[in-house]
Image (spheres, rainbow, N blue to C red):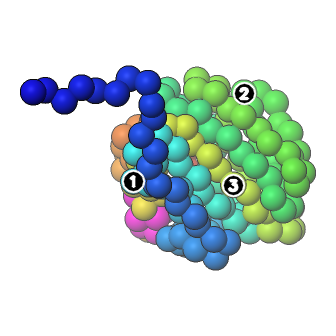
Amino acid sequence: MIAKENYFEDELENKASIIKANEGEKLELNTISITFKVTSEISNDQLGIYEISLPPMAIGAKLHYHRYMDETFIVNEGILTIQVSDKEYNAEPGTIVYVPRFTPHGFRNDTNETVKLTLVFNPSQKREGFFKGLYETLNSVPIDPEKYLKLYNKYDSFPVDISNMIPIRE
């Protein structure tokens, strides 16, 4: 006798993840800190949540876009300068900036205070690999633009201007 599938009741599961304030894998990219909170592994590649700490005058990313994921910025402390297409905004604590795919954007800290934000990627596209590759690429001297672009493209990031894509102030 074949077991009959139940189409009328949900099967409940307990798969919640609770990541406390000081938990998560932490990477230090030069002076920028990234903490993995909800990873691709936890969310089955559906969601990535990362805490970012940008020190004074640091650049998070120059103008770029994504084809397959949306990105959301939640400013927790400080004032984040965010560029969306050809406009710049000062995002204060509590500000949420939703950037759907194919929208050029970049972000940086133009102040003398540290900016803390939460980045959300949906889907996550294994973003942790991007951050780990970024760590390796940006710690090379000199920074190899071809390697940087290869990393960007592998993880669904496309610079608007490849001659001005490395996140350093000139």
Magenta span main SS: helix
Residue 41 has which mark? 1
Task: Residue type at mark 3: give it.
Answer: Thr
Task: Report the residue at 47% width, 40% height from top.
Answer: 46
Magenta highlight on residue 164: no
Tell me the distance, in whole angstroms, between the alpha carbons under discs 2 and 1: 31 Å
Q: Are marks 3 and 1 in contact (CB under 8 Å)?
A: no
- Give residue 126's position: percent from left, percent from top: 41, 47
User: Would residue 31 appear left or right of 46 to someone viewing this image?
Assistant: right
User: Would residue 52 appear left or right of 17 to someone viewing this image?
Assistant: right
Q: Furthest residue to the bottom?
A: 22
Q: Earlier in the sequence, mark 2 or mark 3?
A: 2
- Nearer to the camera, 12 or 21: 12
The magenta segment:
133-140
Q: Secondary structure at mark 2?
A: loop
- In the image, which is nearer the foreground, mark 2 or mark 3? 3
Residue 4 visible? The answer is yes
- In the image, which is nearer the foreground, mark 2 or mark 1? 1
Task: Report the residue at 47% width, 55% height from top.
Answer: 14
Location of mark 3 (residue): 118
- Give residue 23's position: percent from left, percent from top: 58, 74
Q: Earlier in the sequence, mark 2 or mark 1?
A: 1
